[in-house]
Image (cartoon, helix red, strand yellow):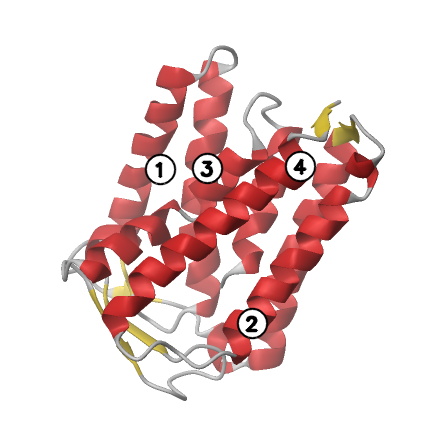
């Protein structure tokens, strides 16, 4: 899952007005930021197998330190705690929302991944495998994003005229980036995938700041 992860990020301002959307975009992909780094340094491993599932060519057979249930909970607490150290207001509420945004990544991955999500490092692996049903997986992906976007629009208001349409531009750009990543050939080596993913997620966070945080505010 890619753009579906941003649904919870967009819904965040409904529950914690002081947490910027760009921070929540980083939070919902925080496990993948770590995964990209760990893959690059050989701490975790992935194989590129075209046709491995209908949606993704990635065989994510080794990612216990970023995508196991226990470690997802640990990283959720870590990032939520970091946010509370820097937040000026709503420290507790903000930390909870940031932590929940991090953990939402694991929950959504659980729906689409084949059983490659360990319950703990070295433990049994789970995954409902919706990536093997492309229409259902894509419907889920777009459905979660649209739901989050609608919540965001109801929880915020435009500060400028551009702010009235900018969230829709953000959503359209996400769809465009997803289309490019979906149809583009995979990288030549698995190690290349980590930095590419980190750059893509960072671009999305920048777009969230530009098209959401700068031109809209919580109601």
Circle 1 residue:
76
Of labels 1 and 4, earlier in sequence is 1
Position of 143 with respect to 81 (left or right) is right
Q: In the displayed structure, would residue 197 be above or below residue 102? A: below
Closest to the camera, between mark 3 and mark 2, is 2
Of labels 2 and 1, earlier in sequence is 1
Circles 3, 2 touching at the beta carbon (< 8 Å): no
Residue at the location (42% across, 42% down)?
Answer: 102
The circle on residue 180 is 2
- Horizontal and vertical percent for residue 2? 51, 61
Mark 4: few/some/many CA within 10 Å (<14, 14-19, 20+): many
Mark 2: few/some/many CA within 10 Å (<14, 14-19, 20+): few
Of labels 3 and 1, earlier in sequence is 1
- Horizontal and vertical percent for residue 219? 75, 22
- Horizontal and vertical percent for residue 44? 18, 61
Q: Could you say whether the residue bearing mark 1 is in a helix, strand or loop? A: helix
The circle on residue 212 is 4
Position of 97 with respect to 175 (left or right) is left
Circle 3 residue:
100
Of labels 3 and 2, earlier in sequence is 3
What distance separates the C-alpha of mark 4 from that of mark 3?
Answer: 20 Å
Q: In the displayed structure, would residue 7 be above or below residue 53? A: above
Residue 107 visible, this angle? no
Of labels 4 and 2, earlier in sequence is 2
- Horizontal and vertical percent for residue 111? 47, 64
Q: Could you say whether the residue bearing mark 4 is in a helix, strand or loop? A: helix
Circles 4, 3 touching at the beta carbon (< 8 Å): no
Q: In the displayed structure, would residue 65 be above or below residue 20? A: below
What distance separates the C-alpha of mark 3 from that of mark 1?
Answer: 7 Å
């Amino acid at each position: 899952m890619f753009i579906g992860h941003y649904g919870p990020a967009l819904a965040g301002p409904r529950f914690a007005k002081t947490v910027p959307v760009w921070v929540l975009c980083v939070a919902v992909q925080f496990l993948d930021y770590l995964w990209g780094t760990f893959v690059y340094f050989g701490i975790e491993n992935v194989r590129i197998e075209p046709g491995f599932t209908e949606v993704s060519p990635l065989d994510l057979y080794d990612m216990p330190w970023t995508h196991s249930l226990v470690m997802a909970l640990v990283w959720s607490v870590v990032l939520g705690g970091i946010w509370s150290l820097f937040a000026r207001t709503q420290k507790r509420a903000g930390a909870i929302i940031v932590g929940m945004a991090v953990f939402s990544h694991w929950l959504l991955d659980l729906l689409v991944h084949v059983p490659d999500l360990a319950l703990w490092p070295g433990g049994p692996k789970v995954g409902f495998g919706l990536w093997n049903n492309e229409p259902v997986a894509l419907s889920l992906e777009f459905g979660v994003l649209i739901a989050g976007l609608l919540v965001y629009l109801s929880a915020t208001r435009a500060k400028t005229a551009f702010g009235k349409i900018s969230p829709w531009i953000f959503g359209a750009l996400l769809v465009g980036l997803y289309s490019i990543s979906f149809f583009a050939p995979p990288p030549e080596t698995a190690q290349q995938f980590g930095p590419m993913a980190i750059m893509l997620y960072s671009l999305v966070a920048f777009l969230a700041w530009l098209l959401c945080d700068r031109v809209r505010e919580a109601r």
